[in-house]
Amino acid sequence: MNIIVCAKQVVDVSEIKIDASTKKPILAGIPQKISDIDKNALEEAIKVKEKTGGKITVITVGTPDAKERIKELLAMGADEGVLIPQPQHADYYVIAHLLAAAVKKIGSYDIILCGEASIDMFSGQMGPRLAGLLNIPQITYAQKITVEKDTLVSERNLGDKAVTIETTYPVLLTVTKEINQPRLPSLMQILSAANKPIHEWSVADLASADVTPKVHTIDVKGVPMQRKNIIFQDDVDQSVTKLVDELAKAGVLR
């Protein structure tokens, strides 16, 4: 199997704080990491490779320091990485076109794996956009994958139920966080990752990609989460009645 994993470098959202005066997120100095669910995608790719053999290529569109994050994925078990510089004001449209052009440049592949969404924006758009540009089948929210010689079977999580789907190759899958537990690389794997190649492809190397953004982000602000700190100390029935009344007054209940 030739497997491609799309991974995104993101800020550690647990470290984000909001500036009280401007309501803007404070991003300076926050650690960067690979989006958690993209690591689940890589772990699943490694499991497939352990069963079938083959090669895993990781593609990232990001800033130059994303190279360090790619090394972490190589230590986990990927064979090579591709880093594409992110154009200024790039939106989902641009990123999807760059990823599609990179996949076409790689050439032969059987499976593309993505996280169901990135932990920073959580739009869930990239996998479906990429499958559409490549004109290949897609299975989103995969919680289990079984690979055979000519077909792939996946359980797709629909919340209160799961649907089992079978498809031929090539195919793109977005996986849920519940699909597996990403492994931690050993010291020897971390050291050996230094010998694995990371290719840096410029936008010019991907001339077929349309890098004209369709959406322009005007502003990003945090949502204020002020608590009223109302404590009900009556008996249970009275407290419930008062709580319902307060929720109705606040417009939560109608």
Image (tube, rainbow, N blue to C red):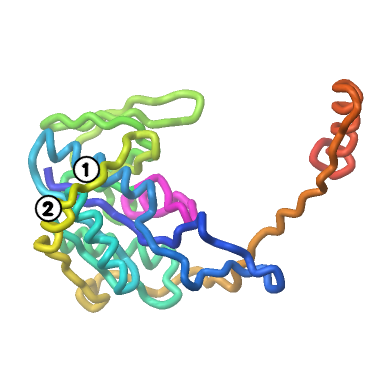
Magenta stretch holds residue 163: no
Local secondary structure at mark 2? loop
Viewer-side residue, 93 vs 222: 222
Q: Which residue is mark 1?
A: 45
Q: Position of residue 94 (x, y in %)?
A: 38, 67
Q: Nearer the viewer, mark 1 or mark 2?
A: 1
Q: Residues within 10 Å of mark 2 (few under 14, many from 20)?
A: few
Residue lying farthest front?
A: 187
Q: On the rendered structure, is 80 left or right of 229?
A: left
Disc on the earlier residue, 1 or 2? 1
Residue highlighted by disc 2 = 108
Frontmost residue, 126 versus 39: 39
The answer to whether residue 96 is above or below residue 203 is above
Report crowding for label 1: few under 14, some 14 to 19, many 20 or more residues within 10 A (C-alpha). many
Q: CA distance from mark 1 to mark 2?
A: 16 Å
Residue 181 location in percent, x, y?
A: 32, 37
Q: Which range is magenta?
A: 115-131
- Quadrant assignment, res 236: top right
Amino acid residing under circle 1:
Ala
Amino acid residing under circle 2: Ser
